[in-house]
Image: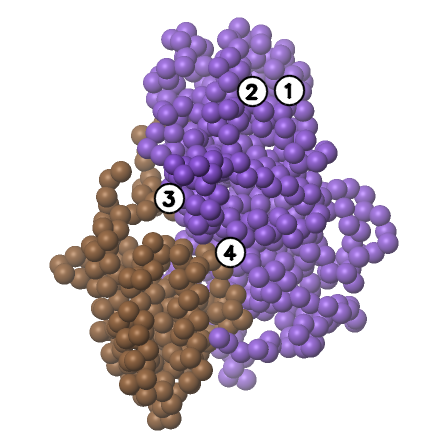
Amino acid sequence: MGENSLPGEFDLLVQGTGFTESIVAAAASRIGKTVLHIDSNEYYGGQWASFNLEGFQKHLSESPNFQATQNWNTDESETSEWTKENILKTSRRFSIDLTPKLLFSRGKLVKLLISSNICRYAEFRAADNVCTFEESTSSLKSVPCSRTDVFNSKDLTIIEKRLLMKLLNSFLNYKDEEVPEEFKNYLGKPFLEFLKFQRLTPKIINNVMNSISMCDEDALLEEGIEKTKNFLLNLGFYGNTPFLFPMYGCGEIPQCFCRLCAVFGGVYCLKKPISKIEEKDDEISFTTDNQVIKAKKLVFGSSNIPEELLSSEKKTDHCCGGLSRGVFILEKPLGSEELNSGGGGVNFLKLPGGNGGAFILQLSHYSGTCPKGLHLVHITSKSSSTPSDDLQPFVEKLFTDEHKPLYTAYFTLPSCSSKVSTTENIVECCGTFFELDYDKSIENAEMVFKKLYPDEEFLPRAPDPEEIIIENEDPTAISEHTLPEDLKAQLLLEESSKEV
Amino acid sequence: MATRKKSLLKVIILGDSSVGKTSLMNQYVNKRFSTQYKATIGADFLTKEVVVDDRVVTMQIWDTAGQERFQSLGVAFYRGADCCVLVYDVTAPNSFKNLDSWRDEFLIQAGPRDPEHFPFVVLGNKVDLENRQVSTRRAQQWAQSKNDIPYYETSAKEGRNVEQAFQTIAKNALAQEAEVELYNEFPDKIRVQSDGNRNGNSDNCQC
């Protein structure tokens, strides 16, 4: 199925197909650089990959630095539908993310997907509910997001509805230039203190703090305003919440960027370890399958650092990773029937707690990540001890006797604590961050790209297939097409170089 | 849940490098052929409206974008495919032998609900060339042995049989839908696009 030898020279070698590396690869290919994108794994995504159930189990057991534990707790009696064997039979229906995320409807990633036109490769489901955990009943409740939702909510009294609407409106209309009276005295003070002073009910404070703004307890009013406003401004685009979840899981996203890279000529090689990396006279050479290949620049992902690049210097900060993760398979989903009406969808919950709390995502088969009749729950927190210890407080809260997981897995996404020597032409991409969306990772990708190609545009819009020029056409005809300027220039340049 | 009929068919083209996948697609959609690839902008996917049994459907034909060259097509490529076109080059016996692995790869990666009856079509391309190495009989036998996959011999260069082959592709993809009452597995899928041409729901006003 294909040839075996690679071209001998590239502008850029990208090692690792994680989210950040894949964006850099796409951006370089997009501006006409020749890119070789390699991964030693046989799958795309690195720490951002999704696996089917069997693949996931295998991956955990084969990653010693993950501190992984797995545990089955199925009912093995004859009447039980979901025995371990039956669940494993549906393995391929699962798509379990190492790094689950939600996208703000008009967040950085969605905007990037749209502006680069990579959006045509991706499909999403609008998150169905933003939830809150009601301590008194130990259950999940949907947080009303839109005006309609607030008025239809059965969980709020009429007075609470009015208070909430008034509060949200005041955030939405907040301007730095003319700070309203009620805000003035609290600038620079904790957001929670401000909310408490507004004579709101505990329910509303909880909704605004933990579900809408997702602020830590010590967040200042300024942060609270910004985050609440951001939440509200992302409403009304798709569905009832401000969030989107990638169909089939977040592991699809890096592959969308890789496809763009390939469409623009990038060469793809999975299952391809490289060795003997050397930088000499502004040129990098490396060996793969006994073939020596040259590249002008090299980018690698932090979860897959080439040995040659490890240095003895101590790295100053842990920039990424360091996440504790829990993955749970449930038969009966968390929350009421109403919350999971129609078979459930994508439900999101932020639980407060020390060290930033935890993001919790419950997925039904409509997300394309688990079989019908089962539900997948992801918990993500910052890591400070073992993953199971870190997540214990959240797990105890959520999984009561009624919602005992059939399968439980804990693992760590390690932080990039290695010591790496990089140069002007060798740049490292960070791994995953503790954030709901992808903002920091996109910033990182853009930063890496600008380091490599300071004067070039970062992911300008790619033409639609209909605009693509078929080979051999008259170059003068090309300019009549609605191609972006940069591509016109590239095409014409190529034509003229051929003539010479 | 409502059963919604699909009006968009995702068709993916598989086969070894340089058997003519991109050319077939271009010939069918754009009625053009070229012997030369432009490196700057490669093949992505093309769409074409087809009429099958008085029904207008949009066929979206996805090229491998070269990622098949080193067996590096990610699973995302296979998602939601309604039909799979397997292409080999009649002058390259290896590309014929590899049809088995491409078919298996598709069934594993795409994981269709009913693999036995999933619509495939096999195309033996480059019949305009003189040094033919794979006989029609051999190819037909193979296609028959795989649950009677329809088989066509095509020339993307001369446009021979291309229209017919793709018509069958569309027809079989739709027939499959009728047979197993293949409802849209994921009815609420969203594609994001710029605000200008978005037709999402607008009844959700901001607070």
Mark 2 Cα shell of 10 Å, populated few (<14), some (14-19), many (≥20): many
Residue A255's mark?
A: 4
Residue A113, image x, y percentages: 48, 49
Tell me the chain of label 3: B
Q: Residues within 10 Å of mark 3 (few under 14, many from 20)?
A: some
Quadrant of the image containing the C terminus of chain A: bottom right
Identify the secondary structure beneath mark 4: helix
Disc 4 and disc 3: Cα gap in Å?
Answer: 18 Å
The residue depicted at 54 percent of the width and 71 percent of the height is B70
- Rounded to the nearest angstrom, the CA distance separating label 3 from label 2 is 29 Å
Instruction: Identify which amino acid the numbered label 4 is placed on.
Output: Gln
Rendering quarter of residue A24 = bottom right
What chain letter is assigned to the residue under label 1? Answer: A
Asked whether residue A209 appears in the rendered view, the answer is yes
Element type at mark 3: loop
Residue at 34% across, 22% down: A148
Asked if labels 2 and 1 touch by Cβ distance under 8 angstroms, the answer is yes
On the same chain, marks 4 and 3? The answer is: no
Pointer 2 indicates a residue of which chain? A
Residue that numbered label 2 is attached to: A209
Q: Which residue is mark 1?
A: A217
Q: Nearer the viewer, residue B37 or A154?
A: A154
The residue where tag 3 is placed is: B190
Q: Position of residue A341 (x, y in %)?
A: 34, 29
Element type where label 1 sits in the image: loop
Amino acid type of disc 3? Ile
Chain under callout 4: A
Query: Tag 4: Cα neighbours inside 10 Å, few (<14), some, or many (≥20)?
Result: many
Q: Which residue is pictured at 48% across the width and 43% down the height?
A: A84
